[in-house]
Amino acid sequence: MNFWYFTVYHLTRLIAKLCFRFRCIHPERVIQEGPVILAMNHQSYLDPPLAGIGCRRAIYFLARKTLFDQPFLGWILPRLNVIPIDQERSDVSALKATIRVLRQNDGVLVFPEGSRTLDGQLQAPEAGVGFVIAKTLAPVVPMRIFGAHEALPRGGGKLRFCPITIVVGEPLRFTAADLQGNNRDVYSRLSRRVMEAIAALQLEPDAHRP
């Protein structure tokens, strides 16, 4: 971690614990070296920083490039491993950026659903994460966040300080045998496999305890 990532990482951890009683269950399942895709459901703008502090290693994030036009954000975001993507070509640029990060043996956070949920429920995955898996065969660590929708839902509403927990699943690994078939079918099948792994992660009854 560079100085800025380290500083914001620990500041975020402190705020998350004080304001949201944040917990990460099974953080040891995150692969600590080499390329890894962290695949998580998408509930809120809070998801990226909370996923980041759920990992002991530094990871990369994607964000729309217009954020980088603002003076302070344009300076700090690159130092926090945030990569700009072009909204006008969001699918293409995001996929290329993700593949580039993985080929550098780094970890990157992706949201298979593409956009934030409106009702807090899991959504069907897009084919993008399957495409990235097919091009890199990078292992995938499924993660599921609980409580972020209640804390800061899509579509407005006040920020509420309620418990948030991330549950980390066992890594998924892929081989060339998983890529047999029509490309579109392969991408969709891989994406569904990742989303099924996310859906299988459950919150234990006492997981939000202080």
Image (spheres, rainbow, N blue to C red):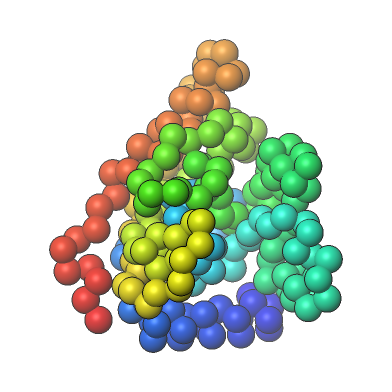
Q: Is residue 160 above or below residue 174?
A: below
Q: Is residue 204 above or below residue 113?
A: below
Q: Which of the two residues, 132 or 113, is positioned nearer the viewer here?
A: 113
Q: Residue at x 45, y 60 (%)?
A: 153
Can residue 141 be seen here? The reply is no
Residue 139 on image: x %, y %: 50, 44
* Residue 129 in the figure: left or right of residue 81: left
Q: Is residue 137 above or below residue 35?
A: above
Q: Residue at x 46, y 84 (%)?
A: 15
Residue reaching furthest to the left: 205
Residue 40 on image: x %, y %: 46, 51
Can residue 46 be seen here? The reply is yes
- The number of numbered badges drawn on the structure is 0
Residue 1 on image: x %, y %: 63, 75
* Residue 48 in the figure: left or right of residue 105: left
Q: Residue at x 16, y 63 (%)?
A: 205
Q: Which of the two residues, 49 or 142, is positioned nearer the viewer here?
A: 49
* Residue 168 in the figure: left or right of residue 77: left
Q: Is residue 131 above or below residue 14?
A: above
Residue 117 on image: x %, y %: 45, 48
Q: Which of the two residues, 193 or 42, is positioned nearer the viewer here?
A: 42
Residue reaching furthest to the top: 182
Q: Residue at x 42, y 39 (%)?
A: 123
Res 29 quadrant in image: bottom left
The quarter of the picture where the C terminus appears is: bottom left
Res 136 quadrant in image: top right
